[in-house]
Amino acid sequence: MRKVKFYGATSLDGYLADQNNSLDWLFKYEDTSIMEKSYQPFIKNIDTTIMGRQTYDDLMDMTDEFPYPDTTNYVLTHRKIKSKDVISKNIPVEKLIGQLKQEPGKDIWIIGGGKIVSSLIEHHLIDSLQLQITPDILGNGIRLFQPMNSNSDFKLTSSQQFDQFIDLTYELKGPTA
């Protein structure tokens, strides 16, 4: 069965982006080994991405071309997006995950979006979290984890240092939905 995975970088204090929704703090690092030894092995097992509208808009502000043309890409939004690269969906992420897990394919990447990640964790629908933690303390911004009403139990399955990054992989204990 397909797995649902979060892969992304956070500051030491748990922020995905700074208070201006910017990732500039992250782009000061030029470690190519994390791309070769962490990102490349991760992305080869992905054929579907899911992100929120804010993440999509921020991503498109950073680039002229959509960076994942070889995957099926869903954006959770109540507004239509005119793009050949993404499918707009106005449904709860839990429902979309339920549909996608019934289809054949590779793993599903949750890209950014603390609300989406937290909702999926709360519903025990994320199979793994792969976090690259930087030494930055932002103090404010967009948190990876939003307040939740339930607990989840993950176990650390790997850790590796890439220059200033620590790459941690956690797997959900027990069966997933």
Image (cartoon, rainbow, N blue to C red):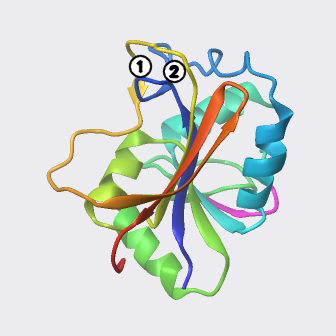
> Which stretch did the figure color magenta?
69-73
Q: Residue tagged by mark 1?
A: 141
* Rendered residue at 78%/45% (across/down): 67
Q: Name the side, left or right, on which 90 lies relative to 163.
A: left
**Is residue 72 on the magenta stretch?**
yes
Q: Residue tagged by mark 2?
A: 21
* Rendered residue at 66%/37% (across/down): 161
Q: Residue placed farthest to the left in the image? A: 149
Q: Of the residues under marks 1 and 2, which one precedes in the sequence?
A: 2
**Residue 65 visible, this orientation:** no
* In the image, residue 131 above or below residue 68: above
* In the image, residue 21 above or below residue 159: above
Mark seen at residue 86: none
Quadrant, the C terminus:
bottom left
Quadrant, the N terminus:
bottom right
Residue sitting nearer the eye, 42 or 83: 42
Q: Position of residue 97 (x, y in %)?
A: 45, 71
- The 10 Å Cα crowd at callout 1, few under 14, some 14 to 19, many 20 or more, is some
**Is residue 27 on the magenta stretch?**
no
Q: Position of residue 146 (x, y in %)?
A: 29, 39
Q: Main secondary structure of the magenta part?
A: loop
**Residue 108 visible, this orientation:** yes
Q: Secondary structure at mark 2?
A: loop
Q: Name the side, left or right, on which 67 lies relative to 126.
A: right
Tell whether label 2 touches label 1 (CB within 8 Å).
yes
* In the image, residue 30 above or below residue 137: below
Residue sitting nearer the eye, 67 or 139: 139
The quarter holding residue 164 reads: top right
